[in-house]
Image (tube, helix red, strand yellow):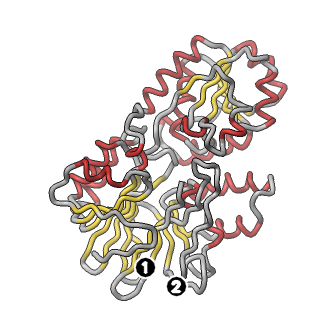
Amino acid sequence: MDGCVTEIQSASGTKIAIDIGENLANKDKKVLPELKVEGLNDGKASFDAVFITHYHGDHIGLYNKVLQGIPIYIGEISKNIYQILQKKLLMAKIVSEKDIEIINKFKTFEIPNKIKINDILITPIEVDHSAFDAHMFLIECDGKKLLHTGDFRTHGQRGKAVIPSIEKYVGNVDCLISEGTTLSRKKEDIITEFDIQKKAEEYFKNNMYNFVLCSSTNIDRIAAIHKAALSAHRLFVCDKYQKDILMYIDKISRSNLYKFKNRVLSYDDNILDLMKEKGFVMLVRPNSISKKVMNKFDKNFNFIYSQWKGYLDKDFKEYEYLQKFVPENYVYLHTSGHADFYSLKKLCEVVKPKIIIPIHTEKPEAFKEMELKDSKIELLEDKQEIII
């Protein structure tokens, strides 16, 4: 997957970037070359700010390459979650103390407060995504309005609020820069996180011992799995790092959906007998520590794989370590973190853009299938510019 960077410049020369993502390995297992943007992470600094939509690597991964003096803005909750993640990577010596210092200096914003960067006005709008605290950005300048969607969906726990928020804070725009991740895999079933919860509950009721592999920062997925575990009267277990994230979410959220306190056990060999007696749901990651715990149950367990199925494709880099971890008889239980065709079309109908620029998709031409009469679809190549 290509890393995301969108450059927006006013007539007077103010420049901001939306996201600064790293290129992830493609289907041929080849790591794509690092993105180089003159004035942003290459050469002499000429950008006035960077705004991060959310904390996934293809949107934030090159944060430590941003040239000195360019401020980076991100949602406060996103910043705190990312700090927890990066501190874990620091312990594993994957990132450095300098990287942590950069993250600590991130500027934060609160919705729907506007941020003014010279003559550009930016309004963050919270959306539903597989990353907690993800945002769209409304950009206003020179009498024009532009909406950058980042990654979003309408079938998650908070998905019903997305379109109403756009109607309230955005209205019609001159230009829509929209993700279209799912357009290249339209045959995938799009189910809700509530559907995930109910299906997981059935599995947990029918199996005493359950391991679940999902992203440690996919909070809505973990919340669904957590509620399913409690409904099935199973212990909910994870490692200390995961518990730190969940305790933070519990602290800052008012929703009962994210109440984890006193309902999460941090794994230790001392609770093994209790797990065997009561039954459990344990979140795991593809590493030797989780494998060691799984081996204690001698394949007598239910394993749920709750990530994109493409990672299990032998043509992807992730396959090499996942095949050693995910058992052959796994259960697949997942839904996309991205908007489907009809949600994207609904968005376009609401904001009525004069121009649509697809990004973050392998099939940008699919926007033309929406038959949007008053919108022109611009299929831009990397580094190509357009004036609106």
Residue at 52%, 27% in the rendered image: 333
Q: Secondary structure at mark 2?
A: loop
Q: CA distance from mark 2 to mark 1?
A: 13 Å
Identify which amino acid the numbered label 2 is placed on: Ser
Q: Which residue is mark 2?
A: 46
Identify which amino acid the numbered label 1 is placed on: Ile
Question: Which mark is drawn over residue 117?
Answer: 1
**Whole-percent x, y for residue 72 in the image:** 55, 71
Q: Against 20, is 211 above or below?
A: above
Q: Against 218, is 177 above or below?
A: below
Residue 235 visible in the picture: no
Quarter of the image with the C terminus is: bottom left
Residue 256 left/right relative to 388:
right
**Whole-percent x, y for residue 320 in the image:** 71, 39
Query: Looking at the image, which is closer to me, 119 or 310?
Result: 310
Mark toward the start of the polypeptide (2 vs 1)? 2
**Whole-percent x, y for residue 6 in the image:** 44, 68
